[in-house]
Amino acid sequence: MNRFFVLLSLLLTGFVAQAQKEDPVLFTCGSTNVQVSEFEYIYTKTNGKNADFSKASLQEYLDLYIRFKLKVERAKAMKLDTIPSLREELQSYRRQLADSYLINREVTDRLVREAYERSTQDVEVHHIFFALSPEASPADTLAAYRKAVSAKKQLDSGEEDFATLAQSISEDKSTAANGGKIGFLNVLFPNGFYALENAAYTLPLQKVSEPLRSSAGYHLLKVGARRPARGEIEIAHILLRKDLWEGDPDKLKELAYSHHLQLLDGKRFETLCSEVSDDSRTAQKGGYLGFFGINRYEQAFEDTAFAIRQDGAFSWPVESSIGWHIIKRISKKEFPSFEIARLQLENQIRQDGRFELARKAMIENIKKTNSFKENTALLDKMAKMLNDTFFTFRWKAPAGGQKEVLFSLGSRRYTMEQFNAFLAGASRERMQLRETPFRDALQTLYLQFVESSCMQFEEEQLEVRYPDFKALLREYQEGILLFEATRIEVWDRASQDSIGLERFFETIPGKYQWNERAEVTRYFVEPFNIAVLESIRSAAAKKSKAKMLEEFNAGDKNVIARVEEGVLERDKSQEALEIGQWSAGEVTTIKVDRESNQFYFYKVENVTPPQPKKLSEARGYIVADYQDYLEQEWVESLRAKYPVKVDQNVFEKMIRQK
């Protein structure tokens, strides 16, 4: 036994040494070790595309992160992490984060990445189809499946080739005559066709799939070809319609080629289009059709459009079922990066049936990896005890058997008591199942309870299984602590310590200055008094506001609409720029106030030269400066209290040379 423990100790020591080697400590702050993984995570997240791992960039962020960690160390010493309100805030954040994190990581992210990678290829799909209505009975479903199996056997044996069999038995009339050829497709396939999409992107070329179920029925799928995705192209066209042409059809082709020669000779596409195009919707718009992707237009039209290699270039005439076209390429959309495509794909996937399929697959994987075991005999026993009150809010769980284990997940046991508590809180779900037999209703609710329990079980393991989740929680927790510590030690002190603020203000004399200021009177005059406007302005230069009102607003005259008094500082504001000489007695030129639709001018009553601001006049700016000063002092005191040691060898290894 002694040798066993010695060996175990040596093994553990080796594991620790290996872990430290793979993720070494970059710096220590007091009693806290900060490893390279933590620093690189926050450095990359904060700097985004600018995270170039240059020495200057790393050093700058290291200095910032050390300051951050010093404050967190102080917050822990203040025991702020034990305050109930802060602990509850962190738990609330964890619950919100965990609710979405597992689904996003295990379902959404995987499906988005899968769809994005598939979107780089177009796939040419052929199928033989056996239809099923949405209300198909089990017997009808089995019959359709057997048809598909029988057809697959014929193909595998070589009795029939795919195209011939599709023409004779496929129930998709739109493709049967064409040998089952649907054409080139790209993701996402329609909702309910995820199994076909999987086959289309994974089957070897020319190999026929096993019967595949979709929301429409059963399919035998064959992939004819794959090619780089065409994406979307922006085009215009000139159209010569067959149904409007009364002469020899060959002459219409000749006419199309003669128009093409005009373009080659330098005639503007838009001019020719307006003169000859038979597309009444676009002829006067330069033939503009906008952007389109695969499978929107006929194959010949599509192939010709995508064969044009340059913006502004145009095609040879191409024939479609409606006439002859000359196509001009305007632009082609670049294939989007994953980050750009992600949001659109994510929204589409969340509304697609594949999302629920993947979610259920994740639940099954949780059960499998955690040795899920169940005792469904307890459900049978419970179902026999139910009556109609089960489908009402009045239902109460039976008293017996509460401690019996319904299922287990890992080392955790889930009892009938827990299931009954779940049922008690699911009264709406129970009422919605009122037309369902007791055992079936119970099974439906049981599956919901199992799924909920699996999700909760997995969410509780997130910190262990996913380092980035642990990093997010740490980041949020330390952010809370930093905020509270800074509030107590800096912000509150700066705003409440009036004596300290006054002393600090004395150390920065002259930092905040008033520019030259003018006490002004602004006179407003209505437009209908424009005839006396210049007289009012001239009088204002010689008379006070009181005399002006006495002269021009005596009795019922009210020539001066209103008067405003104020102080203007000499800066770059519109009002300040309207003052010319900035001298006492100056009267400005007449302007129009657009909001009130009135004429106005200023009279400068007095001018005060530049002078320092008082504390009361610049308090907000000074408090902010005082906060910076206190924070700097605080950080320096923390450095003395919590020594910081940086491992320069580890730091140097993070640097990436350009």
Image (cartoon, rainbow, N blue to C red):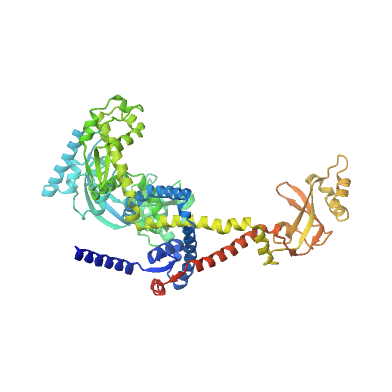
Residue 612, image x, y percentages: 73, 64
Q: Quadrant of the C terminus?
A: bottom left
The image quarter containing residue 244 is top left
Towards the viewer: 2 or 539: 2
Towards the viewer: 130 or 400: 400
Towards the viewer: 440 or 505: 505
Q: From this viewpoint, is residue 259 visible?
A: no
- The residue lying furthest to the top in this view is 388
Residue 316, image x, y percentages: 37, 58
Give the side of residue 30 with respect to residue 432, left or right. Answer: right
Give the side of residue 619 with respect to residue 306, left or right. Answer: right
Name the residue at 32% across, 46% down: 455
Q: Quadrant of the N terminus?
A: bottom left
Name the residue at 37% across, 60% down: 308
Towards the viewer: 244 or 579: 579
- The residue lying furthest to the front in this view is 2
Give the side of residue 640 with respect to residue 154, left or right. Answer: right
The image quarter containing residue 131 is top left
Total numbered badges shown on the rendered structure: 0
Residue 34, image x, y percentages: 41, 65
Residue 395, image x, y percentages: 33, 28
Name the residue at 78% across, 61% down: 580
Q: From this viewpoint, is residue 17 visible?
A: yes
